[in-house]
Amino acid sequence: MEKIELIKKDIEKQNYEKAERSLRELILKDKNNYHYQLLLGFTFEKNNKINEAIKTYIFAKKLKPTDVVHNLLGNIYIKTKKYSEALYEFACSIKINKNNPKTLNNYGLLLIIKRREIESIKYFEDAISLDPNYMDPKYNLLEILEKSNEFVLLKKFIIKEIKFFPNDEVLKYFYAAYLNLIKKNIEAINTLKNIKFINHKQNWEYRRLNLLGKIYDEIKNYKKAFEAHNSANKFLINNFCLSLFSEKKYYNKIKKFSLIAKKNINPFNLTKNKNSSLFFLVGFPRSGTTLLDTILSSHSKIEVIEEKPSIENILKEVNSDEKILCQSLDVKNLNIKYYSEIEKYISSKKINKKIIIDKMPLNLIYSRAINNIFPEAKIIFCLRHPLDVILSCYFQNFILNEAMVNFLDLKRTASLYNYTMEIFNSYSEISEKNIIKVRYENLVSNFDTELNELINFIGVPYEPEMKNFFKKNPDKKRIRTASYNQVNKPIYKSSRFKWINYKEDIEQINKSVEKWIKFYEY
């Protein structure tokens, strides 16, 4: 027992190699000791030896299938994006012990990942009732309430929790978010300024700075707003995603695509197919795609499939970027694969609407491949002033991946925009009849005219109720993109030409996108 305690202290001190050696010595004497194997798996996991951790946990599970080992396996499957396996492990854990708050919280998080947010609430609430001092499910529940604009429930919950845990910094953050939602901006700013995050493992400091920037923007203190967002992005790069940011994986991919696009603007020799009712909603992030998604989804005959990377998934088998963009593809096979994936989704959601619109903003880069696979498909292209788009991306709290991490740097965001537009423009030059441009500025200032034109393009009758789109989508109340807080309310015009307020701060990128400002006649 004394040896085990020493090993645990080594793990706490991050002496993982030493802990591993000590555990292996114990296991040599007692291979079938469940506790040794469990601790070894945990050590592997902490040391980022994920495959070894999984194998060890599985062996421990065979020795003794406890709720603890099922929970640990579920967590590690989430990390490796094996969500079906994670669901199974958490379900097993809950079946064995339905009173483990950590398992319930983890299961709730997994449901959010699986886009089952409403179901997740019950598990967070159950975890809280079992252990009122366990804070993680409270944070998760508060986030759902905030992003759903559930002001009444948010107020009730946050005020209650702040009373019992007045020194909890994360609760203070959510209290500031609540104050911001009810327009008590100065109070919100003061609350945020007084927060001192010591533990940065969940990037709460980034979120604090990001929210501070958002509120400063709302009260028109643009200098402080830019400073806050700039500090937030630098903090995130240096503390959480330096390696991902430095890799430039997606950035280099887009750069390469743009060079190919410039050389290959001739149309493909295509065979017509019957996919005349298929639409793709694309646009650089923050160009109005989510707003348009919400508007179109309010139509009785239109279903927008939101942020599902179906095109990218079916193109993964194509070995080179050049082939994706420029050469003939196995059109028939890719066509079948795409519809198979879409039909699974439609069936699982019990969708019976006539028109399907595939929304994935950065499918911009695959426009020519889409044209090759689905020659009759139509593209809805969302357009917004380039500087507004770039600034909004730079300010936005995205879920980071190899694409979104580029938005933490202003110059790289501008370059990414430039390269992306080069790719799309090479396609649009040869396929204008299948494209409609929806200008964000026109949509918010002349809603009826712009929407009527789009509806005619899609080929369905206009429905007057679409004006109340923000009321007609209860199933989309929790928006799963960065725009969740902007599409649960009527159209507003305050986001047009915001870049003017930051003219001096973004002067460094003006020349890089000047071509597109002129091209799109801004």
Image (spheres, grey):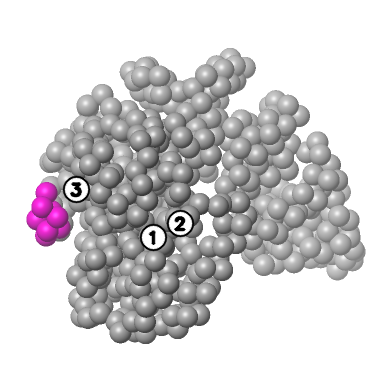
Circle 3 sits in a helix, a strand or a loop, which is it? Answer: loop
Q: Nearer the viewer, mark 2 or mark 3?
A: 2
Circle 1 sits in a helix, a strand or a loop, which is it? Answer: strand
Q: Which residue is mark 3?
A: 385
Q: CA distance from mark 1 to mark 3?
A: 23 Å
Residue 236 visible in the snapshot: no
Image quadrant assignment for residue 78: bottom right
Q: Which residue is mark 1?
A: 279
**Left of 48 or right of it: where is 371?**
left
Does the CB distance between marks 1 and 2 fall below 8 Å?
Answer: yes
Q: What's the residue type where badge 2 is placed?
A: Ile
Does the CB distance between marks 1 and 3 fall below 8 Å?
Answer: no
> How far from the left and from the top, in percent, is residue 111?
63, 46
Above/below status of 522 relative to 334: above
Residue at image coords 14%, 55%: 520
Query: If you read the primary sequence from the N terminus, does the residue marked by circle 1 or circle 2 appear first?
Result: 1
Residue at image coords 38%, 60%: 280
Residue placed farthest to the front in the image? 461
* Residue 521 included in the magenta stretch of the image: yes
Q: What's the residue type where badge 3 is placed?
A: His
Residue 356 image label:
2
Residue at image coords 64%, 34%: 121
Q: Nearer the viewer, mark 1 or mark 3?
A: 1
> How far from the left and from the top, in percent, is residue 63?
89, 60
Magenta segment main secondary structure: helix
The magenta-colored residue range is: 514-522
